[in-house]
Image (spheres, grey):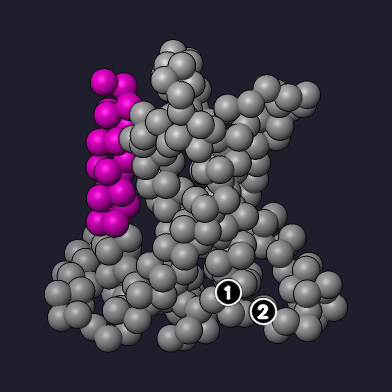
Amino acid sequence: MELLIDSFISALQLVLALDPEILTIVWVSLKVSGTSTLLASLMGMPLGFIIAFHTFAGKRLLITVLNTLLAVPTVVIGLLVYAFISRRGILGMLDLLYTQKAMVIGQTLLILPLVATFTIAAISRIDARYRKTAITLGANRLQTVMVIMREAKFGIAAAVIAAYGRVISEVGISMMLGGNARGFTRTMTTAMALEYDKGAFTLAVALGIILLTLAFAINLLFHFFQGKTQN
């Protein structure tokens, strides 16, 4: 117990002192996770909208596949991407392995189904009369889409926030595809794992404090937007 208390106090001092190593690790985490969330949103929101907005053969099967992909372990995504970007892989010539780009690719694939699924749920809650009214008033396809998106904005925002919360705390993809290189691909989660293995608890606890604070803030935002969708 004394070790835990001493580690927590030392970690808190390290955070408040704005230690350069911690700032670098946090910046890499925020940068990679933010880029992944942006790319997943740009692809997942249109995909979710198309699935929710249209009726086609295999729609239920596609939604089932997306829901299944929500439970895929991060190491499976890591292995899949590794097989493509390793030296013997199809994309080996691009030299992506152990770079931030590789981490972004893996994390984007991880949360793409989440964004799409949450977007489908948000669009599906919108009353069909909004679409019919927009068409009756002479709105074209793009204008109709914008009306629906505006009504579902809180649900879509919740999808993006949930995706960011999922990806900021993952460790498997970052470790397998990034290599945990200091100052380059080391994220909060991979640094915590490394420091724990070394027996250096202070930095690990400091990063844990930051990660928990971020997770708390993300959950507050998520519940705020989720509450908006239910009002």
Which range is magenta? 212-231
Q: Residue at x 26, y 62 (%)?
A: 209
**Per the image, is 70 magenta?**
no
Q: Is residue 77 in view?
A: yes
**Residue 66 place in picture, x, y as percent:** 65, 37
Real-space Cα distance between discs 1 and 2? 6 Å
According to the picture, the residue beneath numbered tag 1 turns out to be 101
Nearest the camera: 55 or 157?
Answer: 55
Please say if the residues under marks 1 and 2 sit with CB atoms less than 8 Å apart.
yes
Q: Callout 2: 10 Å neighbours few (<14), some, many (20+)?
A: many
4 vs 53: above or below: below
Q: Secondary structure at mark 1?
A: helix
Q: Which of the 4 image quadrants contains residue 89?
A: bottom right
Q: Quadrant of the N terminus?
A: bottom left
Please name the amino acid that badge 2 sits on: Leu
Kind of residue at disc 1: Lys
Residue 147 vertical placement versus 99 (above, below) = above
Residue at image mark 2: 96
Q: Residues within 10 Å of mark 1 (few under 14, many from 20)?
A: some
Q: Name the residue: 38% across, 67% down.
A: 30
Whole-percent x, y for residue 80 in the image: 74, 60
